[in-house]
Amino acid sequence: MAETIEVLVPGGQADPGPPLGPELGPTPVDVQAVVQQINEQTAAFDGTEVPVTVSYEEDGAFDIEVGVPPTAALIKDEAGFETGSGEPQEDFVADLNIEQVKTVAEQKLPDLLAYDLKNAAKEVVGTCASLGVTIEGEDAREFKEKVDAGEYDDVLADEATA
């Protein structure tokens, strides 16, 4: 019967220390192999906290499932700030361009309720509004209206090779 361990690790930077080591130490798995595989699978989230589930069997076989970091964490990483605004409608902490919004939307799309990239981007924009992040120099709500009006359809069109 498989057992599971759920941890948050910094993307691409997991190590055999806490939180993984103490959790995996008493198990039959090769801790170093688990760490290496986690780092390979989370490299794209460089340093951002990523939820990881490790399932293992009594014979030492293991499987790793990597989640997607919260939207706010992806935005903070993309924009390069630590903390959102205490007054997000008045005090802005960062500005993203449309390409950065698209990058976050593409990373988060599998976990969102959105059925396409444009709607995923609108969800990202909503999180930007609550963090005090402007987009293309505009308030996130005004930017969302432009997305609704189709002004960014060319950038946010789903690509067949995405």
Image: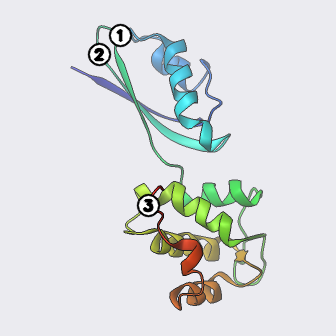
Q: Where on the picture, by quarter, is residue 9?
A: top right
Residue under the image location 34 percent in, 14 percent down:
61
Q: What type is the residue that disc 3 sits on? A: Ala
| Residue 107 pos. (x, y %) | 53, 54
Q: Tell me which numbered mark, 1 or 3, is placed earlier along the sequence.
A: 1
Q: What type is the residue that disc 1 sits on? A: Gly
Label 3 neighbour load within 10 Å: few <14, some 14-19, many 20+: few
Residue under the image location 68 percent in, 40 percent down:
47
Which numbered disc, 3 or 2, marks the residue closer to the eye? Answer: 3
State if disc 2 and disc 3 touch (CB < 8 Å).
Answer: no
In the drawing, does residue 56 fall left or right of residue 68? left
| Kind of element beneath mark 1 | loop
State if disc 1 and disc 2 touch (CB < 8 Å).
Answer: yes
Q: Which mark is residue 57?
A: 2
Relative height, residue 104 to residue 26 (above, below): below
| Kind of element beneath mark 2 | loop
Front one among 158 and 15 = 158
Q: Tell me which numbered mark, 3 or 2, is placed earlier along the sequence.
A: 2
Question: What residue does disc 3 label?
Answer: 160
Question: What residue does disc 1 label?
Answer: 60
